[in-house]
Structure formats: C-alpha cells, structure tokens
C-alpha cells in the first residue's frame, strides 16, 4: 500500500452513493439476495473469470481425481484409478520408514536455508541497481546478471563441480592462503552451503526483475516529499522504497514459504553422492532411488498428497501471519 | 571348476526339450482344437529355421521406436523398404527420444496407449508391468518362434533365460541373445608410459606391449607410474550415479563380489551354494582393502568416486592420470582426442585384470529385449507377428540383414565364411574411416533397436582389428555360470523395496568411507551390526526363501 | 534523465554516500564477473576443438577454433523446423497465458468482490496439488490434443505464482482512476484495457517475459504428448542430442557423431537457446529499468 501522499484529492462521492445515514439500520438480507446483488453489480468482473475458471476446472482439478491411487493399489498398465482400495497402506509405508523422516528433515533444512539466503538477495541487488546513476551501466549489469538462470541444471552442476574440485578454483584460492585443499563434494557438512550458494548464483539476477518492476510503480512524488522533509538517501530508501516494495515482497515471501520444500531434484541428483547422503538426500532423490518415481505411482501419489498438505498449511499460516502483522497478504 | 550336477543337467536338458516342443508350464498344446485358430491371419504354415518369413497378407504392426540422435528416424531408409519387401510387414513407429525413452514407455503403458511391440527394454525394466497383466508372458509363446528356441539350445542359453523368470516361473521379456559373453569394459592405460617401465618378461602381451595380468600387478604398475605424473596415476570415471561403477564391477568380479554397476545386495556364493549378503562378504572386504591401499599410497585419486566423467577425462587428457576405466567406444571418442596434445602419447585397453577368482568373465549373455502387450494375444495376426519378430530378431539371416543390410549393396562376402566386408564408400564404427556415407544415417542399418546380439562371428565383424585382439584374449576366459533365480512375488517385492535401497545405500556409503580411509577396518564388526539393524538378515531370508521356493516348484 | 524511483531533487551527496557509490560499483562489477565468466567459458568452448576441451585447456578464449558442431546442428533441417515450432508455441502460449492470467488477476484484485477468497483459493490450491503424469496424459489424449500444439500451449496456461504477483500489483494501484472511470459509466472491460493495463506496463512486461521464457525453455509437455519429431520444440531436439553425446549407449553408433560434437554439444546448445532471449531482452528491459512512470494522479 502506498504511503499517504501529501497531494491527495478529497474523495469525490460518486452520484447516487451518499454515505448511509447513521440512523439507518441495515436489515439482514438473505444470502441469496446478496449474491444476486453482487452478480448484478459485478457481472462483468465475473465474466472475466469464466475462462480462467474453466481452465482450472478442466486442466487442473479434473486430473486431480487421479490422486485417488494414493489410496488404491495402482499397477502400471492397469486401470488408471488403481485396482482396489488399500486405504492408508502407502501412507503408512513412508510414515514408518525412518529413512523417510531423515530425508524429510533434510528437505526442510535445505529448503529453509535456500529461502533464508536467496530471498533477500534479489531485493538487495535491486536496491543497489537502483542507486546507480549511469543508466547504461545499470542496464548492462542487469542484462548480465540474469544469464545464469538460463543455464540448464546439468551445466550448472558441472560448473559447480569444476569450481569446488580438489584442483578447482576454490581450492586454488585456499592453497594460496595456505589452507589444505578440501574435497568439498565428499564432505556432508559442505553440501548445504554449496547447494544454497549455487541456487543464489543462479537465481539472484532473474529475481531482481520483479523487484525492479515494482520499483517503477512507486510514486516519485513520494521521494520528492521525503526529500523536502530532509530525508537522506538511506532514509528515503527505508521510508519510501521498502514500503513501496512491501506488497511484492510479502507476496513472494508467502509463495516461497509455501513452496520451499520443492528443492531442486535434478541439481541434487547431480551433486550428491553416497558420501553426502546424510545431508544431501531429500525426499525426491530418495524416492528416485527407491524406484518409486518410475514404478510405484501409488506411493508417489501418497507422498505428493502429503507434501501438498504441508505446503498448503505453510502458505496458510504465512498468509495469516502476514495479514496480522504487516497488513498485506495473499487473501 | 563349477560342474553342473547330473540333476541340473537333466533339468536343463528337459527344459530345453520343453522349450523346443513349445509347451509352457501348464500351457495348452495341440490337442484336439488347434490353438491360435483365430490368430493365424497372415501367418506362414511352413515357417521354420532357414525359411525367410513372408506374411501371406500385408500386415502392419505398431512399434515403440527409440530415436537415437546419432541417426535420427528417417522414413526413407533402405532398411524399412527392404524389410517390407522381404517380409510383407510394415512397422508403424511411435517415436520417443533416447533421452527419455523409458519414461515414455512407462507413461504409454500406464495410459493404455502403448504400441504392441516394445523393444530396447533391459531386464528388469519389464518387471513393474507384470502385475497388471499389461505385458505378455512370452515364455508361453516361444513355441511360435523356432529360431529363438533353436538359438537358445545351440548356445546353451537356458541358464541365462532362467534369470528372467518370475515367481510364477514365466518370463515376460524376449531378450537379445549373444553366443558368447561380450566383454567390453576394462581399464585403459597410457601404453607409451608402459613402454618406459621395466616389466617382467613373463607377462602377456597385447598390442605389442607387456601388460599387467593381475590386480596386484596393476598395483605394481601404478606404483611405477607414479614417477611419471605429479598427480594420481589412476583417476576414474563413471561414478555418477554409481560410485566406481566400472572399477568396483571389474575388481569385485575378480574377487567374487561384484560392486559398482554389477552390485546386487545378494551374491551367489559358488562354493557355499547359497546367497549371501554382498556387503559383508570376506571378498568384499578384501576388495575394499585393496582399494584403500591404492588410495593411501597416492595411486588412486580419491575424487574418482565422485567426480564427473568430464573431470576424469580432463585429468587424463592433461596427462595428470595415466590409467582410466574404458570401453571400446570411449577410447576412440574421448581419450585419443584428449591426449592428442601430449607428444608420443598412446592409449589402449588392457585385458581385464585377474583376481582370486582366476581368469573369469562374469555376466549375462542376454541383451536388451522386447516386451509385447497382452492385448496382442487376441489380435488376428498374433501368430504372424511372433513369426515376424522371430525372423527379424533371432534368425541368422534377419540379424545379418538388420546389422549390415543387403549383400551387394551395402556389403560383400559372408559373415559365416569370414569374408564379410563393408562396401568401401560406407562407414560404421571406423571400419572404413573417411567413407562418405554412414551406414546408420544413410541406410538405417545397424540400428540399436534391431542390431543387438547374435553369433560371435557376427559380433566380430563389427570390430576393428584393435578391438578384435582384445576380444580374442577375453574370449579365452571361462564364463562363470549364472546365479540361480530367486524371484520375489509382488507382495514380497513391495516389502523388500525399502530394505533393498536402504541396504544398498548403506553399503555404498560405508564402503566408500572404508576405501577413502575415513573409517578404519577395525570397525568392520560394527559395520556388520549396523547392517543387521537395517534388516539385512530379514532381507537375506526373503531371498533365500525365494530361491528355495523357485527351485522346489520349477526345478 | 528519468531514473526509476527517480529523485529529481536530492540533497548534495555526502562523503558517506560517495563511498557507498564506489563500493556499489565494485559490488556490481563483481556480480558481472561472477555471472559472465562461466558464459564466456561456454562461448569459448562452443568454438573450441575437442582436444583442448577434453584436456581442460579452454578458459575464456576459444582454442582450436572451429565451427563443426554449429554446422552440424544448423545444417539439420529438423533443427530449423523445431526452432520455428518453438517460436510459434511460445508466442501462442504467452498470448493465451497473459490473457487468462491478467483477467483473472484483475478480478482477484477487487477486494469488494463477493466470493473473492474462494476464487483465490482455487488458484492457490493448484500450486500444491496436481494430477500426476498419467491422469494428465489421459485427459490430453481424450481431448484429442495429442500431437497438436494445444497440448503444449493450454495445460500450463495459468501459473498461480504469476497470477498472485500480478494481483498484488493491481491491488497497489491507486483506486481513484478506476473509480472515476466507473462513475463516468465506463464498463469494466474498457477500464481494464484502457486504464489499468497502460498503468501496469512494468508488471505486464515482466509477466510476459516470465511466461515467454518458461515456454521457450520447456520440453516436458512436448515430450509427454508428442511422438512426431517434426512437431517437437527445439529444446527436445537439443536435449536428445546431448543425451546421445553423453550416454554413449550404442557401441560404435556414435560414428555419425564425431568426438568434436561430443565435446561441445552442450555449450553450443546453450548458446543457440539463449541467443534469441539475449537479443530480445533489451526491448523488454526498458519497461522496468529506465522507469516508466506511473501516471501522476491528475488533479
């Protein structure tokens, strides 16, 4: 929400809609009537929503029926709805598997670490770019910074492996300052930092685009007003820019909290090895090794539902907290 | 020396006889009403070995096509037109890229949209589709395939076929068949460095150079090579996703406990005649100790087990490492180009080093194979289809055709007489280097879908002289008999699935730690206990039970 | 000169700020180096010969300059067919996605709308639950969309993520303009098209970019629903090339497949895929870098 401006027109009451006289008691209307009123008033808005809703219904919700195989035994090649009811059999399979909980906690930790470190970076970079006076330099930096986003995961993994190899650049630097070379990819305690760093490197530049777009929507007169009030650049940033970015930030934060368990399957698969399973193994890679992904669709569906539930819970809580504390939220 | 007991010989012979007669365990035979009476449309009545299959009516079969980017699918290939001319059959391909072939197969079968013939399936990829009845128990229908059954008898492939059998005694994949085990993977060494070393005269020779015959000789060579590099003489590849995929496989086989690509949680112990858990075998421990010694003495690069192929090749190309895992293709494609910058450098295979097991080859002579959808059984041209598959994939004439094409057009001479020669303007695999046309790209022959397997004579025609020399040495070795089948039921498999992966993961992780010196061998007893806590005993009981059950019911 | 978040009037920059400016430039240069270096390496590789690549000697400059792999790829007519496919698919998909997403986001941004939370929930729910490979396949097949462009362009039309971000942008627009228009009797459609969208150039450009890039890079839907190579997008084609180079599964099969191609097919692929994006990007960048000003609230 934009900060209150000093140049605001007094609200002009549209004709025919005078504020209700205080003594009038608004009678309780039956909900059917309220709906009809809403439809009459906003039918154009509702009409805009028809096609998207159709899309969601056909292409998103209809296939969801297939998730019933989480509770029915599915045999590849048999009925797509499974052969018979087995209730919570698959759910219990993974709930009772100690390795599952271990990889579950790995997923949480890795996702949370990624979120904590990669969420603020695009914002900071956008703000830094914002302070650049020379437009050409600013555009150049921005055009280059997003390039890593386009590298395929295989290539990024190869770059990372090259960088942290025993004779790679990182160890060369360490050697120069007198530290023994470390086989980073063979030590479980290094996996998380390496993964998070590679995620940051790959996605920071691309992430700034949205924030830069948000920056353009901040009313410049707010800066004028702040400057008139004697604010220096830092105070301007704190009191004008950041609040202007707040809706975007909160939206992205809530969405990212909801999806933070979607850690990169392919990248981990390429970077991990049995020596680092203890920290690197996540739900998706574990399932992959189990052969679940290719063979056991029921099991995979059960886990999918489990993860979906958690995501929904996370997004709901994040939204609630945001609404109570900051005032902006998704709904 | 493993000798089949009389009983096993009888059983093998009996099974071969059964297979030949075309009876399945419990299947019907020609008694009274002829089977397949509604399925003989287009079929030949006098089809047999030596007979060119030709459908009596033009037929079309849908087939899954694995599109290899090296020779992308081309409707106009001579292969297709000649095939239709000879057999009166047109194949209708459903194209899936090489990169994601298996996922597509799984998807199409799951959605009920799969074509009837599905080739390029490696055992046990067919297993998930069995429980739903989506694919045919082909073992019941081998009576329709005379070339297939004759090949199995001639080349004594029954034990190999038995490894495909499921708990119900049937198998669901028509495998590719090799007459002899095809050994391709081994170590490659810098022969120019070997030439500089002082090697014992008792050693065998290959490519005019003495080569280390055993693993302990390899150790000596690595030690001597250390003075020719300032890094590790052996830095290996093929470690993603299976660490030491090749190294642990050939080394483990030499000890009797295959690892890497060949790893199974349960290994057949030939002397004890039972299944034992691989990760706790004495032979496994010895292998780990051997590798540990290599690492501790700076002969084996610790990164071998986690680095990418690209990194390993770069080290070899820069002259940092002098020994690396290889197969025939990668020497030509990867290593020779990589060392071009090093003056005088040459690289060749060495024969697979020998260990305590003696000079043995281990593996299955089966190749990737064909699944057939169950719904084909009720089509009117089912018999014709089986005959067609039999001719194209299993008859000697069909195999030569699929591999090399048409005599007088793409090649001259005869494979059997040893006079085979590819036409000079056509190249494949470096046989006619510099020739303008490529056999696969221009004509569609030697397609990986149709051309795998065959007699040793046929296989030898594809090797340049260098590879032939290697094959000659390896073929002299004894091939270990295959472990007996121990198939699990669907219910057991679900139970075992979690155990298997967890056990394998744990063995791999701890083995690496032992090799790299992160864990001392004095903790071996603890390690065994940790495995017991992970259901090792229960898993082995399951396997042993499955083995005995199969033995009891199916001999 | 307008700068985004422009400050036409500012106090004289103090010492601290000047230091910050220098540090800022240093940091940004660091960012450029760290992101550009691997690319320079990839460009160099795509033009280098396999011997130098395989022995790890290629850094920032091509060594053993040759165009073999480029020629091999660019001379394949299937490559161009597939490239054309990608352009068409991306254009159509982006158009459909932007239409659906923008209209729905606009609807969701109206706080007074009855049932709004329910409509938002419908979108949010789809972020966490989906049908799975086979049900989707059966659906597309039943609708007869297999082996057609529609299988690629429709099923992923709305990204809940993009939708919700757009909604946030719409919500932050000052309501006075729309209210004034509503008073003047302008209908919703025209308000959206004539007033709201021109004010939202930044977010529209950004979302168009996001959608376009994601469709440009996508291969999975094509892999699932298409079996005819001449319909593939170029990403599938290139993906298969790489698999052929790196799998080495067919002994000897790679003779149509020189070691040179093996060595740098991945680098060439990246360059070919990213080149159009790099060329087009500056045209979109001006919408959110040089600061399209939100129209002032007119008195």
Image (tube, coloured by chain):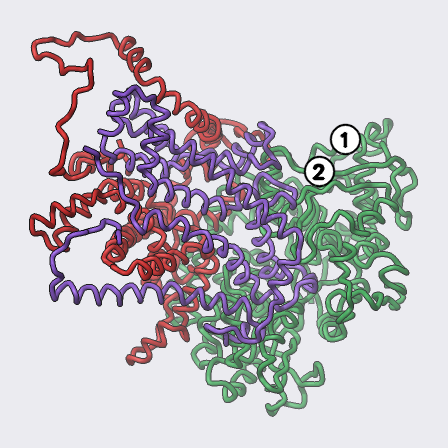
Q: Which disc, if any, is residue C172?
A: none
User: Among the chains, which one is purple?
Assistant: C
Determine the residue positioned at 29% across, 34% down: C170
- Looking at the image, tell me whether mark 2 or mark 1 is earlier in sequence order: 2
Subunit under mark 1: B
> Residue at 83% across / 49% down in the picture?
B147
The residue depicted at 13 percent of the width and 37 percent of the height is A7
Q: Is residue B152 above or below residue B523?
A: above
Residue pointed to by mark 2: B116
Residue C41 appears in the figure: yes
At mark 1, the secondary structure is: loop
Q: Quadrant of residue B343?
A: bottom right
Q: Residue at the location (54% across, 57% down)?
A: C272
Percent coordinates x, y for residue B226 in the rendering: 50, 86
Q: Is residue A224 above or below residue A20?
A: below
- What is the letter of the red chain? A
* Image quadrant containing the C terminus of chain A: top left
Q: Are marks 2 and 1 in contact (CB under 8 Å)?
A: yes
**Left or right of A323 on screen, residue C206:** right
Circle 1 residue: B379
Position of residue A29 measured from the top left corner of the image (x, y, whole percent): 22, 8
Chain letter for mark 2, please.
B
Which colour denotes chain B?
Answer: green
């Amino acid at each position: 929400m934009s900060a209150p401006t000093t140049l605001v027109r007094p609200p002009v009451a549209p004709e025919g809609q005078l504020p209700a006289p205080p003594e009038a008691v608004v009678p309780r209307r039956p909900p059917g009537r309220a709906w009809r009123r809403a439809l009459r008033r906003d039918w154009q808005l509702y009409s805009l929503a028809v096609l998207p809703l159709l899309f969601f219904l056909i292409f998103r919700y209809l296939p969801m029926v297939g998730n019933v195989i989480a509770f029915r035994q599915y045999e590849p090649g048999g009925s797509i709805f499974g052969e018979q009811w087995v209730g919570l059999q698959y759910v219990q399979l993974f709930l009772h598997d100690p390795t599952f909980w271990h990889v579950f906690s790995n997923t949480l930790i890795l996702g949370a670490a990624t979120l904590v470190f990669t969420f603020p970076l695009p914002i900071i970079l956008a703000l830094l770019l914002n302070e650049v006076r020379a437009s050409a330099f600013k555009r150049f930096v921005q055009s280059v910074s997003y390039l890593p986003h386009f590298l395929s995961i295989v290539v990024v993994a190869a770059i990372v492996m090259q960088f942290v190899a025993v004779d790679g650049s990182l160890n060369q630097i360490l050697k120069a300052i007198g530290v023994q070379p470390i086989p980073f990819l063979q030590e479980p305690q290094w996996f998380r930092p390496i993964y998070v760093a590679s995620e940051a490197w790959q996605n920071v530049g691309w992430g700034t685009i949205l924030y830069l777009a948000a920056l353009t929507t901040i009313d410049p007169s707010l800066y004028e007003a702040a400057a008139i009030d004697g604010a220096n650049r830092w105070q301007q940033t704190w009191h004008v820019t950041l609040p202007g970015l707040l809706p975007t930030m909160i939206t992205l934060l809530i969405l990212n909290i909801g999806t933070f368990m979607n850690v990169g399957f392919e990248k981990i698969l390429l970077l991990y090895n049995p020596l680092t399973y203890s920290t690197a193994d996540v739900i998706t890679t574990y399932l992959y090794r189990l052969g679940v992904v290719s063979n056991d669709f029921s099991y995979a569906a059960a886990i999918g539902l489990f993860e979906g539930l958690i995501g929904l819970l996370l997004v709901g809580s994040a939204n609630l907290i945001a609404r109570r504390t900051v005032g902006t939220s998704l709904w | 020396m493993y000798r089949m007991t009389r009983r096993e010989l009888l059983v093998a012979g009996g099974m071969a006889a059964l297979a030949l007669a075309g009876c399945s365990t419990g299947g019907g035979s020609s008694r009274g009403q002829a089977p397949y009476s509604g399925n003989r449309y287009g079929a030949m009545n006098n089809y047999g070995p030596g007979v060119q299959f030709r459908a009596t009516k033009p037929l079309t079969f849908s087939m899954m096509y694995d599109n290899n980017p090296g020779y992308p699918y081309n409707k106009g290939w001579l292969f297709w037109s000649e095939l239709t001319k000879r057999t009166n059959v047109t194949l209708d391909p459903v194209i899936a890229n090489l990169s994601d072939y298996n996922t597509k197969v799984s998807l199409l079968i799951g959605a009920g949209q799969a074509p009837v013939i599905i080739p390029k399936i490696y055992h046990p990829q067919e297993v998930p589709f069995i429980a739903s009845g989506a694919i045919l128990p082909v073992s019941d229908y081998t009576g329709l395939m005379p070339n297939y059954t004759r090949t199995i008898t001639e080349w004594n492939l029954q034990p190999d076929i038995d490894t495909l059998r499921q708990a119900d005694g049937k198998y669901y994949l028509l495998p590719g068949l090799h007459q002899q085990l095809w050994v391709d993977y081994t170590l490659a060494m810098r022969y120019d460095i070997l030439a500089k070393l002082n090697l014992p005269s008792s050693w065998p020779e290959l490519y005019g150079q003495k080569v280390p015959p055993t693993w302990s000789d390899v150790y000596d060579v690595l030690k001597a090579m250390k003075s020719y590099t300032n890094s590790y003489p052996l830095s290996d590849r093929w470690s993603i996703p299976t660490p030491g995929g090749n190294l642990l496989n050939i080394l483990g086989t030499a000890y009797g406990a295959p690892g890497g690509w060949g790893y199974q949680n349960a290994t057949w112990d030939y002397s004890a005649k039972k299944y034992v858990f691989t990760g706790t075998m004495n032979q496994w421990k010895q292998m780990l100790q051997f590798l540990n010694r290599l690492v501790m003495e700076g002969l084996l690069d610790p990164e071998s087990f986690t680095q990418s192929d690209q990194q390993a090749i770069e080290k070899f190309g820069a002259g940092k490492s002098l020994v690396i895992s290889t197969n025939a293709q990668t020497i030509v494609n990867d290593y020779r180009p990589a060392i071009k910058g090093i003056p005088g450098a040459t690289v060749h295979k060495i024969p697979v080093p020998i260990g305590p097991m003696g000079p043995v080859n281990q593996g299955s002579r089966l190749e990737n194979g064909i699944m057939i959808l169950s719904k084909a059984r009720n089509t009117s041209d089912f018999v014709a289809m089986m005959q067609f598959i039999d001719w194209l994939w299993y008859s000697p004439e069909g195999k030569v055709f699929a591999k090399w094409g048409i005599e007088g057009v793409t090649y001259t001479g005869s494979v059997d007489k040893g006079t085979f020669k590819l036409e000079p303007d056509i190249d494949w695999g470096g046989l006619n280097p510099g020739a303008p046309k490529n056999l696969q790209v221009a004509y569609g022959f030697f397609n990986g879908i149709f051309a795998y397997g065959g007699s040793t004579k046929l296989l030898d025609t594809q090797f340049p002289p260098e590879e032939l020399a290697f094959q000659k040495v390896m073929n002299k070795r004894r091939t270990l008999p295959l472990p007996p089948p121990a198939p699990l039921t669907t219910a057991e498999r679900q139970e075992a699935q979690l155990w298997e992966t967890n056990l394998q993961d744990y063995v791999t992780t701890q083995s690496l730690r032992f090799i790299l010196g992160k864990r001392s061998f004095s903790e071996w007893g603890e390690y065994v206990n940790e495995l017991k806590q992970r259901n090792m005993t229960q898993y082995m009981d399951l396997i042993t039970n499955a083995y005995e059950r199969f033995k009891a019911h199916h001999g | 000169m307008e700068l985004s978040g422009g400050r036409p009037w500012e106090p004289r920059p103090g010492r601290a700020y000047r230091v910050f400016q220098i540090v800022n430039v240093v940091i940004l240069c660091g960012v450029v180096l760290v992101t550009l270096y691997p690319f320079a390496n990839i460009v160099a590789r795509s033009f280098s010969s396999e011997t130098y690549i395989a022995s790890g000697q290629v850094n920032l400059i091509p060594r053993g300059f040759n165009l073999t792999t480029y020629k091999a790829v660019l001379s394949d007519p299937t490559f161009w067919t597939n490239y054309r496919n990608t352009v068409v698919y991306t254009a159509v998909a982006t158009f459909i996605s932007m239409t659906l997403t923008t209209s729905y986001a606009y609807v969701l941004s109206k706080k007074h709308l009855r049932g709004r939370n329910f409509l938002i929930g419908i979108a949010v729910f789809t972020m966490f639950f989906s049908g799975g490979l086979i049900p989707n396949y059966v659906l597309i097949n039943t609708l007869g969309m297999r082996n057609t462009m529609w299988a690629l362009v429709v099923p992923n039309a709305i990204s809940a993520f993009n939708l919700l971000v757009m909604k946030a942008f719409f919500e932050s627009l000052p309501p006075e303009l729309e209210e004034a228009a509503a008073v003047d009797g302008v209908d919703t459609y025209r308000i959206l098209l004539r007033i709201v969208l021109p004010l939202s150039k930044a977010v529209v450009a950004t979302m168009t970019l996001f959608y376009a890039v994601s469709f440009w890079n996508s291969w999975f839907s094509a892999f699932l629903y298409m079996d005819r190579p001449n319909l593939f997008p170029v990403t599938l084609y290139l993906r298969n090339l790489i698999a052929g180079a790196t799998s080495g599964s067919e002994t000897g099969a790679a003779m149509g497949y020189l070691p040179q191609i093996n060595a740098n097919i991945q680098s060439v692929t990246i360059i070919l895929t990213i080149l159009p994006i790099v060329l087009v990007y500056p045209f979109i960048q001006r919408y959110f870098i040089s600061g399209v000003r939100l129209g002032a609230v007119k008195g």
